[in-house]
Amino acid sequence: MQLILASKSPRRKQLLGQIGLTFDVIRPVLDESLYFPGEKPVEYCMELARLKALSVANTSPGALTIGADTIVLLNGEILEKPADMAEAGAMLERLSGHTHQVYTGVSLQSPDMKVDCTFSEKTDVTFRKIDKNEIRHYIENFAPFDKAGSYGIQDFSAVFVSRICGCYNNVVGFPIYKFYKTVKDLTLKLEFHSKFPHRSL
Protein backbone atom coordinates (compact mmCIF):
# COMPACT_ATOMS: atom_id res chain seq x y z
CA MET A 1 0.00 0.00 0.00
CA GLN A 2 1.39 3.36 -1.02
CA LEU A 3 1.53 5.87 1.81
CA ILE A 4 1.57 9.62 1.13
CA LEU A 5 2.31 12.38 3.63
CA ALA A 6 0.41 15.48 2.53
CA SER A 7 2.56 17.98 4.39
CA LYS A 8 5.42 20.41 3.88
CA SER A 9 6.56 19.96 7.50
CA PRO A 10 10.07 18.52 7.82
CA ARG A 11 9.23 17.50 11.38
CA ARG A 12 6.35 15.26 10.33
CA LYS A 13 8.54 13.71 7.67
CA GLN A 14 11.21 13.03 10.29
CA LEU A 15 8.75 11.51 12.78
CA LEU A 16 7.30 9.09 10.24
CA GLY A 17 10.79 8.28 9.03
CA GLN A 18 12.12 7.50 12.48
CA ILE A 19 9.81 4.47 12.76
CA GLY A 20 10.94 3.23 9.37
CA LEU A 21 7.84 3.94 7.33
CA THR A 22 8.08 3.94 3.55
CA PHE A 23 6.16 6.92 2.19
CA ASP A 24 6.09 9.68 -0.40
CA VAL A 25 5.68 13.38 0.34
CA ILE A 26 3.29 15.56 -1.67
CA ARG A 27 2.58 19.08 -0.52
CA PRO A 28 -1.14 19.81 -0.27
CA VAL A 29 -2.64 22.61 -2.32
CA LEU A 30 -4.50 24.46 0.39
CA ASP A 31 -4.49 27.91 1.94
CA GLU A 32 -3.61 27.14 5.56
CA SER A 33 -4.82 30.58 6.64
CA LEU A 34 -8.35 29.50 5.76
CA TYR A 35 -10.67 30.12 8.66
CA PHE A 36 -13.76 28.11 9.51
CA PRO A 37 -16.24 30.44 11.28
CA GLY A 38 -17.96 28.99 14.31
CA GLU A 39 -15.74 25.96 14.64
CA LYS A 40 -14.04 25.05 17.88
CA PRO A 41 -10.21 24.88 17.81
CA VAL A 42 -10.15 21.07 17.80
CA GLU A 43 -12.63 20.93 14.94
CA TYR A 44 -10.62 23.62 13.17
CA CYS A 45 -7.35 21.64 13.12
CA MET A 46 -9.16 18.40 12.24
CA GLU A 47 -10.92 20.04 9.31
CA LEU A 48 -7.67 21.53 8.02
CA ALA A 49 -6.02 18.10 8.31
CA ARG A 50 -8.91 16.52 6.39
CA LEU A 51 -8.79 19.11 3.61
CA LYS A 52 -5.02 18.75 3.28
CA ALA A 53 -5.32 14.98 2.98
CA LEU A 54 -8.19 15.17 0.49
CA SER A 55 -6.34 17.68 -1.71
CA VAL A 56 -3.76 14.96 -2.35
CA ALA A 57 -5.89 11.81 -1.99
CA ASN A 58 -8.29 12.88 -4.73
CA THR A 59 -5.43 12.81 -7.25
CA SER A 60 -3.58 9.77 -5.83
CA PRO A 61 -5.67 6.66 -6.51
CA GLY A 62 -4.81 3.55 -4.52
CA ALA A 63 -2.81 5.40 -1.87
CA LEU A 64 -3.48 6.18 1.77
CA THR A 65 -2.91 9.90 2.33
CA ILE A 66 -2.08 11.49 5.69
CA GLY A 67 -2.94 15.11 6.40
CA ALA A 68 -2.11 16.91 9.64
CA ASP A 69 -2.45 20.31 11.25
CA THR A 70 -1.05 21.45 14.60
CA ILE A 71 -2.31 24.41 16.61
CA VAL A 72 -1.29 26.02 19.89
CA LEU A 73 -4.12 27.14 22.15
CA LEU A 74 -3.74 29.61 25.04
CA ASN A 75 -6.81 30.47 27.10
CA GLY A 76 -9.04 29.43 24.23
CA GLU A 77 -7.20 31.50 21.60
CA ILE A 78 -5.34 29.91 18.69
CA LEU A 79 -1.75 31.11 18.32
CA GLU A 80 -0.87 30.74 14.66
CA LYS A 81 2.56 30.93 13.03
CA PRO A 82 4.12 34.36 13.70
CA ALA A 83 4.41 36.81 10.84
CA ASP A 84 7.59 38.47 12.09
CA MET A 85 9.99 38.82 15.04
CA ALA A 86 7.72 41.18 16.93
CA GLU A 87 4.76 38.80 16.74
CA ALA A 88 6.94 35.83 17.69
CA GLY A 89 8.23 37.69 20.73
CA ALA A 90 4.72 38.69 21.79
CA MET A 91 3.52 35.09 21.56
CA LEU A 92 6.38 33.75 23.65
CA GLU A 93 5.81 36.43 26.27
CA ARG A 94 2.18 35.33 26.50
CA LEU A 95 3.16 31.67 26.83
CA SER A 96 5.74 32.47 29.54
CA GLY A 97 4.71 31.12 32.94
CA HIS A 98 1.50 29.54 31.65
CA THR A 99 0.11 26.21 30.50
CA HIS A 100 -1.13 25.94 26.94
CA GLN A 101 -2.54 23.16 24.82
CA VAL A 102 -1.16 21.70 21.60
CA TYR A 103 -3.66 19.98 19.35
CA THR A 104 -2.82 18.05 16.21
CA GLY A 105 -5.54 16.99 13.84
CA VAL A 106 -4.71 13.97 11.68
CA SER A 107 -6.71 12.70 8.74
CA LEU A 108 -6.34 9.42 6.83
CA GLN A 109 -7.96 9.49 3.42
CA SER A 110 -8.28 6.99 0.58
CA PRO A 111 -11.42 7.14 -1.59
CA ASP A 112 -10.45 3.86 -3.31
CA MET A 113 -10.08 1.97 -0.03
CA LYS A 114 -13.07 3.79 1.49
CA VAL A 115 -10.92 5.21 4.29
CA ASP A 116 -12.19 8.47 5.78
CA CYS A 117 -10.82 8.82 9.32
CA THR A 118 -9.95 12.02 11.17
CA PHE A 119 -8.87 12.34 14.79
CA SER A 120 -6.96 14.65 17.12
CA GLU A 121 -4.48 14.49 19.99
CA LYS A 122 -4.01 16.98 22.83
CA THR A 123 -0.93 17.72 24.94
CA ASP A 124 -0.65 20.22 27.81
CA VAL A 125 2.63 22.15 27.88
CA THR A 126 3.74 24.42 30.74
CA PHE A 127 6.36 27.11 30.22
CA ARG A 128 8.44 28.47 33.08
CA LYS A 129 8.88 32.21 33.30
CA ILE A 130 11.21 33.22 30.47
CA ASP A 131 12.91 36.59 30.19
CA LYS A 132 13.19 38.92 27.23
CA ASN A 133 16.86 38.07 26.58
CA GLU A 134 16.02 34.38 26.27
CA ILE A 135 13.15 35.17 23.94
CA ARG A 136 15.36 37.42 21.78
CA HIS A 137 18.11 34.79 21.65
CA TYR A 138 15.63 32.11 20.62
CA ILE A 139 13.99 34.12 17.85
CA GLU A 140 17.28 35.41 16.43
CA ASN A 141 18.97 32.00 16.39
CA PHE A 142 16.12 29.57 15.72
CA ALA A 143 13.69 31.67 13.62
CA PRO A 144 10.47 29.92 14.67
CA PHE A 145 8.35 31.55 11.97
CA ASP A 146 7.11 28.26 10.53
CA LYS A 147 5.87 26.97 13.90
CA ALA A 148 2.50 27.48 15.57
CA GLY A 149 2.92 29.36 18.83
CA SER A 150 6.41 30.52 17.78
CA TYR A 151 8.36 27.60 19.20
CA GLY A 152 9.55 24.08 18.44
CA ILE A 153 9.92 21.88 21.50
CA GLN A 154 12.64 19.85 19.76
CA ASP A 155 15.03 22.82 19.63
CA PHE A 156 16.37 25.38 22.14
CA SER A 157 12.86 26.19 23.38
CA ALA A 158 12.96 22.88 25.24
CA VAL A 159 14.58 24.90 28.06
CA PHE A 160 11.33 26.89 28.37
CA VAL A 161 9.28 23.78 29.15
CA SER A 162 8.88 22.94 32.83
CA ARG A 163 6.22 20.28 32.38
CA ILE A 164 4.45 18.31 29.67
CA CYS A 165 1.35 16.17 30.04
CA GLY A 166 0.60 13.95 27.06
CA CYS A 167 2.33 12.93 23.86
CA TYR A 168 5.67 14.68 23.24
CA ASN A 169 5.64 13.87 19.51
CA ASN A 170 2.28 15.58 19.25
CA VAL A 171 3.97 18.84 20.28
CA VAL A 172 6.66 18.29 17.66
CA GLY A 173 3.88 18.00 15.10
CA PHE A 174 2.59 14.45 14.76
CA PRO A 175 1.16 11.99 17.35
CA ILE A 176 2.99 8.85 16.24
CA TYR A 177 1.41 6.56 18.86
CA LYS A 178 -2.19 7.51 18.10
CA PHE A 179 -1.53 7.39 14.35
CA TYR A 180 -0.09 3.89 14.56
CA LYS A 181 -2.90 2.65 16.81
CA THR A 182 -5.54 4.12 14.50
CA VAL A 183 -4.01 2.47 11.44
CA LYS A 184 -3.92 -0.86 13.29
CA ASP A 185 -7.55 -0.46 14.35
CA LEU A 186 -8.48 0.16 10.71
CA THR A 187 -6.62 -3.09 9.83
CA LEU A 188 -4.49 -1.27 7.25
CA LYS A 189 -0.99 -2.52 6.43
CA LEU A 190 1.99 -0.20 6.68
CA GLU A 191 5.18 -0.74 4.71
CA PHE A 192 8.52 -0.34 6.44
CA HIS A 193 12.13 -0.07 5.27
CA SER A 194 13.89 -3.36 4.58
CA LYS A 195 16.31 -2.79 7.49
CA PHE A 196 13.42 -3.67 9.79
CA PRO A 197 12.70 -7.36 10.40
CA HIS A 198 9.13 -7.06 9.11
CA ARG A 199 8.01 -4.83 6.27
CA SER A 200 4.29 -4.87 6.99
CA LEU A 201 2.06 -5.11 10.06
Image (tube, helix red, strand yellow):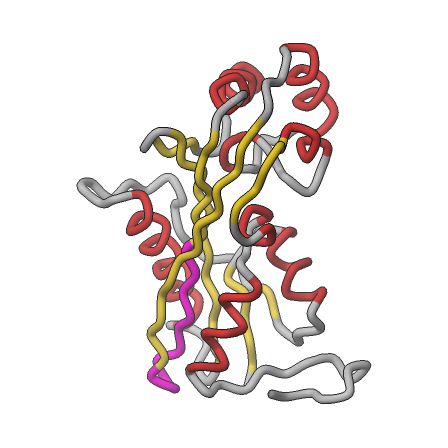
In this view, 186 is above or below 32: below
Q: Give the range drawn in magenta.
A: 105-114
- As drawn, 135 above or below 54: above
Residue 106 on the magenta span: yes
Residue 15 screen position, x and y as percent: 65, 60
| Of 137 and 36, the residue lying toward us | 137
Residue at the (46%, 57%) spot, across then down: 68
Quadrant position of the C terminus in the picture: bottom right
Front residue (pair 129, 141): 129
- Which residue does the image show at 45% across and 61% down from the upper left? 67
Horizontal placement of 31 versus 37: left or right?
right
Q: Is residue 85 above or below residue 148?
A: above
Taking the view exactly as shown, the residue that stands out farthest to the right is 195
Residue at left offset 71%, top offset 37%: 155
Q: Which residue is drawn at 49% across and 81% down?
A: 184
Q: Where is residue 130 in the image (x, y as percent from the top left)?
A: 62, 18
